[in-house]
Image (tube, grey):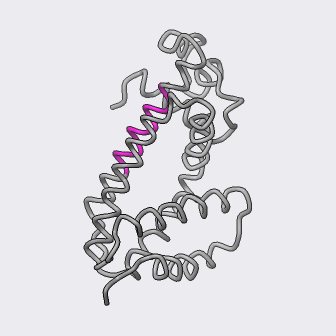
Amino acid sequence: MPSRQEELLDAAIDVLGSQGVRALTHRAVDAAAGMPFGSAANYFKTRDALISAVVERFAERDRTAWQAIAGFLHPADPGELAAALTAYVRRALGPERAVTVARYGLFVEAALRPALQEHLAASAAELRRWATQWLRDIGSTDPDGDCTAIMDYLDGLLLHQLAFPGPPDSLVAAMDRTVRRLCTTGG
């Protein structure tokens, strides 16, 4: 069960993902969490402190989600990896859309405030370690380079689909084609 502080931060992520970074205020977080006015301000005295805490909570949630995925995902070839990534993209653009929008909002904040980059970078590095291992397991001859290319493609695809949604069915073929092109296997 999340603590009161975690509930506030989860509500802040929801606000960020549904209304944007400009709407992220103590009052909006209190309302989204269903808590009395002043609750968020009791934990996070300034907006900067709130945003910093949101980045930390987001990175924690992201790591937990990817740990679960890494625990059951073991692709055997580029096609299976592409299918898994397509499923991830569909979820990120569907039921987890607000979290995905929040992710990119936090990326923009980190670009403007480098102090926020550490937590996001640590979470991304862990995700890339898992993805690099998946690529190694399917026979990539350059798992680090392939991982960078595929993850960068994935970020670009998600951001583009958020801003300019295309037909969801086109994702399957595009993901399969791209993973096969970007994954250098020895076979």
Residue 19 pos. (x, y %): 69, 37
Residue at 33% from the left image edge and 64% from the top image edge: 132
Q: Nearer the viewer, residue 36 or 163?
A: 163
Membership of 19 in magenta stretch: no
Residue 3 pos. (x, y %): 37, 24
Q: Nearer the viewer, residue 125 or 176?
A: 125
**Magenta-drawn stretch, dominant element (helix, strand or loop):** helix
Residue at 63% from the left image edge and 78% from the top image edge: 170
Residue at 29% from the left image edge and 78% from the top image edge: 138
Q: Quadrant of the N terminus?
A: top left
Q: Number of callouts in the render?
A: 0
Residue 77 lies in what quarter of the image?
Answer: bottom left
* Placement of 27 over or under 83, stated as above or below: above
Membership of 58 in magenta stretch: yes
Residue 130 lies in what quarter of the image?
Answer: bottom left
* Placement of 101 over or under 32, stated as above or below: below
Residue 86 pos. (x, y %): 49, 71
Instruction: Please provide the residue range marked out in magenta.
Output: 53-65
